[in-house]
Amino acid sequence: MRIENDPVRLHLALFTVALLFSGNYIISKLGMREFSPMSFAWLRIAGAAAILAVIVRNEPPLSRDDTRRVAGYAILGVVINAPLFLVGLSMTSVHVAAILITTIPVFAVAAAIAFGRERASATRIGGIALACVGALLVVGGERFTGTWRSVLGATLIVINCLSYALYLVISKPAMARLSAKRVVARMFLVGTFVLVPFAALPMARQDWESLSAGAWLALGVVIIGPTIVAYLLQAWALRHADSSVVAAYTYIQPVLASVLGALVLGETLRPIVLGAAVLIFSGVALAGKSGATGSQPADHRHSTG
């Protein structure tokens, strides 16, 4: 474990990141009580794109080839990922979404194995299978203890996780040599324009005059906190600690999000979801053995999720 200079400062930054991402579930659900999910998603992406454009103004520009590659990454990492997450979250509970999000590392390992970038082993394949069973248990559990709406929401979250995991694997070579801030800023910019046709109708139907100050505040907090501040804090933490240390904080989020969901939204954590969480966490741990991909996705998934 490589932690330099001030471990207290480092762990405080990482806990702040976990808290911001956990709060994102709650604040987004509160905001989407008045905003339509697609309106909220597009405004979040567009707002983040505008702020990141200022932050990265002194970063080296992308080449023409890299610009095309990053546009492709944006489809998986922003255009599919962000709206499906928010629409899915609006249809299911906070703890279900938070637990399912932790499948991103194991899906990324599976994708890396499929593309020949990681070596398969019985342990890793078993971990992937175990996590998939856990995810299916969450989705199936929503059918028996929830509603069809929550089943659809959980399914959208799983698709969101698959899309983002695929983005992580495909973009890894480019991310190793390019400015991460520049890449993410360009992805949000591309996502802003590509999503216009999909967001146009929901935004046209949005009753803008009835939106309260609280709804706009929720949107602003989501843009500044989980989307901008958390990303920058995490980028700083990755320069001072092993990726495994950063990845470990991923598993704080379902706990914090579930507690906040119970306190703020009055949600109840069902036993079947707890059992599924154990399967998913165990599967992620097994799939992450003998390779770094299992922890790497946990490091980057929050920057666009």
Image (cartoon, rainbow, N blue to C red):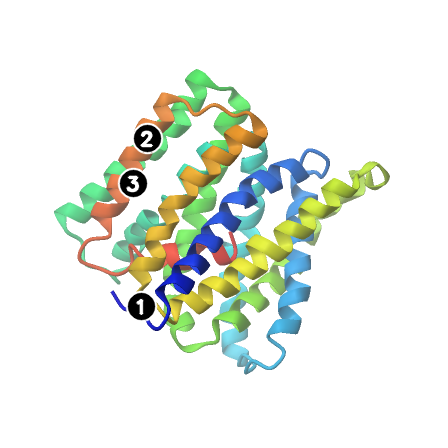
Helix, strand or loop at mark 3: helix
42 and 195: which is toward the camera:
42
Which residue lies under the disc numbered 1? Answer: 3
Quarter of the view holding residue 132: top left
- Give the crowd class for mark 1: few <14, some 14-19, many >=20 residues within 10 Å: some
Which is more N-terminal, label 2 or label 1?
A: 1
Question: Is 200 situated left or right of 238 in this image?
Answer: right
Residue bearing the label numbered 3:
281
Label for residue 24? none
260 vs 241, left or right, is right
Number of residue marks: 3
Q: Amino acid at mark 1?
A: Ile
**What is the CA distance from the residue labelled 3 to the residue labelled 1?**
25 Å
Badge 3 vs badge 1, beta-carbon distance below 8 Å: no
> Is 8 on the left-hand or right-hand side of 31?
left
- Residue plotted at (67% across, 40% down): 31
Q: CA distance from mark 2 to mark 3?
A: 9 Å
Q: Residue 33: horizontal and vertical position, in percent?
A: 68, 33
Q: Residue at x 43, y 44 (%)?
A: 253
The vertical placement of 238 against 278, above or below, is below
Q: Residue at x 56, y 80 (%)?
A: 59
Label 2 element class: helix
Kind of residue at badge 2: Ala
**Which mark sits nearer the N-terminus, 2 or 3?**
2
- Name the outermost residue toward the right: 209
Task: Name the residue carrying label 2.
Answer: 276
Decide if residue 195 is in sight here.
no
Q: Quadrant of the N terminus?
A: bottom left
Residue 293 appearing in the image = yes
